[in-house]
Image (cartoon, coloured by chain):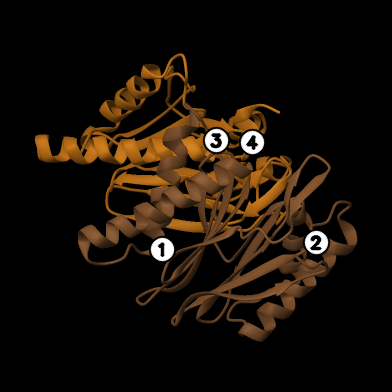
Amino acid sequence: MECVFGMVGKGFALVVADSSAVNSILVHKSNEDKIMVLDSHKLMGASGEAGDRAQFTEYVQKNVALYQYRNGIPLTTKAAANFMRGELATALRKNPYMVNIVLAGYDRETGPSLYFIDYIATLHKVDKAAFGYGSYFALSMMDHHYHPNMTVDEALKLADQCIDEIRSRLVVAPQNFVIKIVDQDGAREHSWRRTTKD
Amino acid sequence: MSIFEYNGSALVAMVGKNCFAIASDRRLGVQLQTIATDFQRIFKIHDKLFVGLSGLGSDAQTLYQRLVFRHKLYQLREERDMKPETFASLVSAMLYEKRFGPYFVQPVIAGLGEDDKPFICTMDSIGAKELAKDFVVAGTASESLYGACESMFKPDMDHEELFETISQALVSSIDRDCLSGWGGHVYIVTPTEVTERILKGRMD
């Protein structure tokens, strides 16, 4: 079962996603990267219908890049979030994208931010977000242990606690997780949490 | 579960003496799960006109963006703000345009019209206006709200008493509704100022 979650810390934002690509009872691969790096300072963790996820995240990434080419400056995280919401909302009554998104970004003026965008195009700026069955465990762990202005180490410790909880309590828990981080130095892959090799 | 109950919401507006109050809950949920406790449901169109949108959060956000767009165009063309009665007709028309594929929202409109006379109204998801002289309600807690408002409301309350009344009515209703809650957001609008207050209720 797919799971994406994220949180905001002091000067950074973290997104964690599982990396399983599953079809019914078969695990196609367990190193699927579901967190798209949109541009230098934005991460988009997506979960949902596999084809929609791949298509929509690529579509957003290319449009974010196009904006920067046309206008010479990058989109802010808020603007990117609203663009995604607009696309999801327009498609909703024609051919909906079944994709839930956690968008993390760092802007020089406003610092780190995290946005929750579900597949019906509900947008909300949050400090912590989670999607999937794993969200029941991740959100509860974060509600208990999260506090504003956490350091990277504290946030990673919390992310590990969430992953451990998902692993131990979810019946079809994903095998591997990827953690990506975005701060003033940019968006990058941080680490993996594996139980199986690729 | 109905699509109107997917995110959970509670809205109420009341008329006072030369003032009005509009209040909402703060929960954003996805069915049984709470996503956020600071969701904004009441939006300012201009200093004397507020609109609250209950129902599906996504459609509320879409409709709000479209309404702001229409009002800004109106301001450019007419060089003045829209009257609440006009705005209500605009919302009603926009909702009926989507008669066979509607926005899943129930708006509550509250404003000060000509001579600062308070105006409130609500409508269903396809734009059937319901004007009222005392109070209007919308959302998952609407039945509780009807009861609470009917018993607590008095005509011609001043803004202090109106705040107390609308707050009590809102909090007592949303405390009994599992889909709305996590506090309240109250706006008291008089001809001279707008006061915004956050309420604390059962934080669950």
Amino acid on which disc 1 is placed = Thr
Give the x, y percent position of residue A135: 73, 55
The disc label shown at residue A77, or none: 1
A153 horizontally vs A52: left or right: right
Chain designation of label 3: B
Asked if the residues shown at circle 4 and circle 3 are in contact, with their CB atoms under 8 angstroms apart, the answer is yes
Asked if the residues shown at circle 2 and circle 1 are in contact, with their CB atoms under 8 angstroms apart, the answer is no
Same subunit, labels 2 and 1: the answer reads yes
Chain A tint as drawn: brown
Residue beneath label 3, please?
Answer: B56
- Circle 1 — which element? helix
Tag nearer the camera, 2 or 3 = 2
Residue beneath label 2, please?
Answer: A175
The disc label shown at residue B122, or none: none
For the residue pair B123 and B65, the one nearer the viewer reads as B65
Q: Which chain is orange?
A: B
How far apart are labels 2 and 1 at the CA level? 30 Å
- Circle 3 — which element? loop
The furthest residue to the top: B100
